[in-house]
Image (cartoon, rainbow, N blue to C red):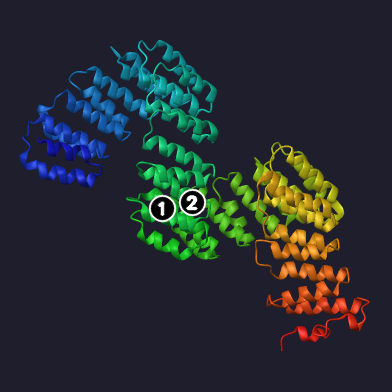
Amino acid sequence: MSKQCLELIYSCKTLAMAERIHSQLQPTIAPDDAFVHNKLIEMYGNCGSSGRAREVFDALGSSRDLFSWVLMMQAYAHNRNQEQVRSLFDSMPAHNLVAWNAMLSAYTQSKSLERAEEIFEGMPERSMVSWNAMLAAYAQSGHLDKAERLFEQVPQRHVVSWTAMVAGFAQQGKFEQAKAFFDRMPERNLVSWTAILSANAQAGRLEEAKRVFSEMPERNVVSFTAMLAGLARQGEVEQARTLFDQMPERNLVAFTAMLAAYAQRGRIAESRQIFDAMPQRDLVSFNCILSGYAQTGDLDEAKRTLSRMPLIDLVSSTAMLTAYSQAGHVEQAKTVFDQMSQQNLVTWNAMLAAYAQNGHMEPSKNIFDSMPQRDVVSWSTMLVAYAQCRRIDCAEETFHFMPERDTVTRNAMITAFAQSGRLDHAALLFARMPERGIISWSAMLGAYSAQGGEHFAEACAVFYEMGTLESPDETCYLSILVACSRKGKLYDGRSHFVSMGLDHGLQPGKQHYCCMVDLLGRAGYLDQARDLIASMPFVPDILEWTSLLGASRGHESLRHGESAARKLLSCGDGATQAYVLLSSLYTDGSFAKSQRSPRMSDTKTLLPS
């Protein structure tokens, strides 16, 4: 066989390509050429076709050598067909160590530990491959005690043996033990470095992952991709993109990780940019961009993407169901659901959410009652739906019967209690939460803030307690500013507003500025309120000018009132409010006619003709 033909076989990645190569070689292959037939068996096995590999194996007949048998076993093992591997093993005229290792690998790869142990114990001799295969099987399946005992028995430990232990402990979340093995390694290779890196990245231990990544003596596309995926999963999208741009080479996994990072956060334009730049795409990458369009409600692009997909699976159909749901087309979503060849818990939850999020409570309950199984997402979806429809008793009943509850569920129930004015129930549930996230604190803080100044002290207590445990986010600051505004606490409100940027690096949004305008206006600092409106990094609209005009009326400042009214008129929809508020200012204020602006003294001139 020529070198060119061998290179073709080694580069073969797909069954279609394998069959083309075989067809081209067929006229030149001697029936008893075991070497060429063995290469074809190996090629078909690597392409996932144990059936075609078996045809070549059978055609070789009595010319088979020991490698033919072993390669055929490996083809079956590659396709997780361990029974055929065993049958072939039992039919072999003789067994050598390679055959025993192939049989052992078939069972370890399929997680058939008991059978793997039988083979391992029955082996007449063992090599480093045998020991490492059994060691990796124990470690990957979580049998770390057995792995440690076997590790101590390994006659000559190789870097692969050490790496199996590092990866095994790390995958089970036992990072200290993993690091201890890593530190004890007499030598490390790129695989062992990547194993400890991947473990930390997958577990969200980003700082440790970054440290390992920076210390690696060399990196390849796998290590870069592991770090990239870890950053993306933790929401560090900008850092992930920087690393992506720095990669000397990128594989499909790296492109897909970056694509998913953007899509999951609704940054669909950047997702599309990555998708269009991909040199090749698979079903996972298509599903990522499809799900991105679905989550952002872009039904047209979701349809176009689906029409381009070479293959559609359950993930694709569920994404399309979600796309219809987000666009409010619930009946089309139900049609997609009914046409699915199979349905799992994710698709049932998606259909449940489609009805619930669009306010169709009876169909939601029917889907919920029909579900073959439910998880915490199913229960939480029903609870949130009831809460949003203000059916608090149904929400509370759902909460009571839930077999398990998580933080999301408890947050939803706190919000439901708060919306119905049952702050005592919300506070009791909050106090009993086994763990609280930032959303939990925000929900309780918002509950107190929404009740006006009456519960200002409680809102402050929650905010300050939260500050001792974790950093408040923009939503928490908005809630405490609302509480300050409704209570008229200018000093506290100004302090929190400044603290956002100085203490936590948060950029105040439009609503934060609006709260401060309201606070300053209520306190009579009308010049400062006007200056804040002028200096904020947003175009002022009806909210800010209405707030200033209302404060002008409260403090009987015609100058500020007329100025705010003019600005309000420029907002288009503010004419009626400007007229009503300024009219009240003229009516209630004890101003002499001479004090009024000639152009503004007749409030009717405020209205456009």
* Quarter of the image where one finds residue 519: bottom right
Of residues 192 and 6, the one nearer the viewer is 192
Label 2 Cα neighbours within 10 Å, binned few <14 / some 14-19 / many ≥20: many
Q: Which mark is residue 274?
A: 1
Of residues 27 and 546, the one nearer the viewer is 546
Q: Is residue 510 above or below residue 130?
A: below
Whether pointer 2 and pointer 1 mark residues with C-beta atoms closer than 8 Å, the reply is yes
* Quarter of the image where one finds residue 224: top left
Secondary structure at numbered mark 2: helix
Of residues 595 and 38, the one nearer the viewer is 595
Q: Is 489 displayed left or right of 327 in the figure?
A: right
> Which amino acid is tagged 1?
Ile
> Which amino acid is tagged 2?
Tyr
Read off the residue under disc 2.
262
Q: Which mark is residue 332?
A: none
The residue positioned 75% from the left and 70% from the top of the image is 545
Secondary structure at numbered mark 1: helix
Measure the alpha-carbon separation of dots 2 and 1: 9 Å
Q: Earlier in the sequence, mark 2 or mark 1?
A: 2
